[in-house]
Amino acid sequence: MFYEIKDSKVSLRIKAQPAASKNEFCEIYGEDAIKIRIKAPAVEGAANKELVKFLSKSFKVPKSDIIFKSGQQSKIKIIEFPLTEKFTEWIETNGYR
């Protein structure tokens, strides 16, 4: 599974695709990551900043609460943030539960 909920925190394993036409969630990548297209290029951390902004807006989490656990320089990243009602809704709506 591409996410884990533990102690009111969500760990999300992401396959980032920078320089896309728009920010969007895509399909499950492999068995344990979700692909997310990011419109910013992978230059000087721009894609990571855009990814944080996109996740913040999508799941109603303050940007300062989104933490890179690993993969800041990689396309596969593990990001942690507080569990929100919006994330729970997203999981249920998309059938990821």
Image: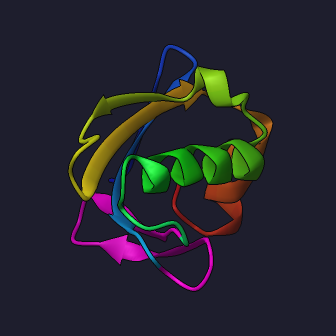
The residue lying furthest to the bottom in this view is 21
Nearer to us in this view, 94 or 25: 25
Image quadrant where residue 84 sits: top right
Image quadrant where residue 32 sits: bottom left
5 to the left or right of 89? left
Name above or below for residue 12 compared with residue 7.
Answer: below
- Residue name at image x 71 percent, y 65 percent: 93
Name above or below for residue 38 compared with residue 90.
Answer: below
Name above or below for residue 75 compared with residue 11.
Answer: below
- Residue name at image x 57 percent, y 86 percent: 21
- Residue name at image x 53 percent, y 45 percent: 49
Q: Which residues are magenta?
A: 20-38
Nearer to us in this view, 49 or 56: 49
Residue 36 placement (x, y as % from top left): 47, 67
10 to the left or right of 44? right
The residue lying furthest to the front in this view is 44
Report if residue 61 lies within the magenta region. no
Residue 20 placement (x, y as % from top left): 49, 81
60 to the left or right of 3? right
- Residue name at image x 66 percent, y 31 percent: 63
Residue 30 placement (x, y as % from top left): 21, 71
Residue 29 placement (x, y as % from top left): 29, 72
Report if residue 29 lies within the magenta region. yes
Name above or below for residue 84 compared with residue 36.
Answer: above
